[in-house]
Amino acid sequence: MRVEDLKHSKLKSWIQEWADIMTPDAVEVCVGGKEEYDRMLQIMVDAGLATALNPDKKPGSYLFRSDPSDVARAESRTFIASKNKDDAGPNNNWTDPVELKKTMTDLYRGCMKGRTMYVIPFSMGPVGSDIAKIGVEITESPYVVINMHIMTRVGTKVLDVLGTDGFFVPCVHSIAKPLEPGESDNGKWPCVPDVTKKYISHFPETYEIWSYGSGYGGNALLGKKCLALRIASVLARDEGWLAEHMLILKITNPKGEAKYIAGALPSFCGKTNLAMLVPTLPGWKVETIGDDICWMKFKEDGRLYAINPESGFFGVAPGTSDFSNYNAMKSISKNTIFTNCGLTEDKDIWWEEIGYAAPGKEIIDWKGNTRPSPQNDKKSDEPIAHANARFTVPASQCPVIAPEWEDPKGVPISAFLFGGRRATTVPLVNQSKSWVHGVFMGSITGSETTAAALDLAAAGTVRRDPFAMLPFCGYNMGDYFAHWLKLGKQAEEKGNGDKLPKIFFVNWFRKNAEGKFIWPGFGENSRVLAWIFDRCNNSDNYVETAIGNLPKPGSLEAPSGVSADVMAELTAVDIEGWKQEIASIRKDYYPQYGDKLPKVLYDELDKIEKLLNA
Ligand code: SAT
Ligand code: MN
């Protein structure tokens, strides 16, 4: 579609302004659909950037290899450019918006020379839903176009909703690799290889996103972390709703009663696996609404309704197997974009812990090097797939996608889960005693650092990732806690306190003195979900303790191989551990937010401490 044919005058002039700066050879407005998707893929196959996979193994699927500098979100180059530094908070890299715009405008000059500028109108959320928002991304990357086709709703329907003057979030993106006449990418992933010259910038006061130099994931697919979390968190604060880094699942009990649960877990805690869990508990069913992001609004009935703003999964490939996530493996059996995975001799993908040996003698790793297959290569510990290799797949291909996953009115949330990796202290499951106590739980979410990661902090210390939002909250985290508290208070004042979701903290990662996991996790987590489900029905399945409501002995049936003693340990209050936890939150964690930290959260510390000492 041509820019001249657009009806939204502000959109038209915005595109023209950027075309003048970036000087592409042509401008194309994306309309979505198969013809456009296939054409973009062909451009990349022709440029040597995409490899078609074996149609007998993975029909309609392609493999990409990125530049080694361009493999993950660039957190150190991610900026929140609010007018006042204090509004960005200690959780963000702040920079002055006027200066940043000047610097970046200069960088953008001529950056699309020799390429086509694509304009992608997209909806985050079912088109026309009152919880959805519209964004428009400009990019010269056909890789971004096809990934946006999968992850968001792209096309003319979005322009219809936008009308002549509707609100959209402007998303400016460039990989910043202009082409000279006659030059082609020739198999080399285009980007700015120097990480210190990439920018992922957010302007919260004007709800704008400017990204420069990266073509990968959250740096480039601007609907995801940039719009649906960082900018949306600001919109949610300003408009009175919630934009969260949460999965959404539907759980149905043996009687056929269903509830919806939203859960925030930091990276590498199995969020996608939980969203698609195969219950071991007989008669229970789990279905998926979303695996990463959740937008919620209170409706007239006083309940909180959620949509998944995305329409696909951008999942971590390594570690995904029939055992860890059967439904994800089924989802990616066709029409999937793979990035930075290994390529087998029979033109299929492979990654570490995929659950079977790589077929053949040789394999091509994510850097494009042909190597002996890992089972024939005793010497190398260089992985075949990059640790952050990804699959992009339409959510509709998930065998357990809930039929209502695209319902524009959303689904009513009964419970929130928070959780991290904690080897000690934090029980398997714990219900908050109140909304404020639940916000406290969300605020202290975190994982223990491991010696294996390149952490500055010593192994075993807790790195807090409040609400799993630390890299994704577009404003001061102290103000974010206050926003959560405010919404709960408003609901209570309207007499809707009992309609608020109940809040739980889960921990699948407890270890014994020998450092071995004592809870099997995966499908067995359905036992914990069932306990939570019953708690939402006010079952008498809990005991009130100093730290929250814990499972009554026997209310949570042990999986096979887990002894009664271990169950008791998993659901007990570790008084000494919690005393230390409280002391460390008070001394090392909360003070960083200064005056922005709501006082009622310190009151929660006092309350729990008093009960622990009683
Ligand atoms: O690369 S993304 O930001 O989209 C994915 C992630 O880091 O969780
Ligand atoms: Mn995520």
Image: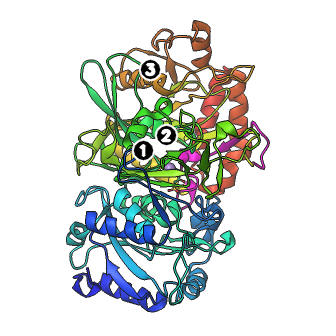
The extreme front residue here reads 361
Q: Position of residue 575 (x, y in %)?
A: 68, 21
The residue drawn where x is 72% and y is 36% is 583
Task: Residue type at mark 1: give it.
Answer: Asp
Calculate the distance from the C-alpha at mark 3 to the C-alpha at mark 1.
20 Å
Q: Is mark 2 within 8 Å of ligand 2?
A: yes
Asked if 405 appears above or below 126 in the picture, the reply is above
- For label 1, the residue is 291
Task: Residue type at mark 2: give it.
Answer: Lys
Q: Position of residue 585 (x, y in %)?
A: 68, 41
Q: Nearer the viewer, residue 501 or 291?
A: 291
- For label 2, the residue is 271
Number of other residues with Cα within 10 Å of mark 3, as a class: few under 14, some 14 to 19, many 20 or more:
many
Q: Is residue 460 magenta?
A: yes
Q: Position of residue 595 (x, y in %)?
A: 63, 56
Q: Nearer the viewer, residue 12 or 361?
A: 361
Asked if 525 appears above or below 401 in the picture, the reply is above
- For label 3, the residue is 527
Asked if 196 appears above or below 403 in the picture, the reply is below
Span shown in magenta: 455-478
Which callout, 3 or 1, points to the residue nearer the camera?
1
Calculate the distance from the C-alpha at mark 3 to the C-alpha at mark 2.
17 Å
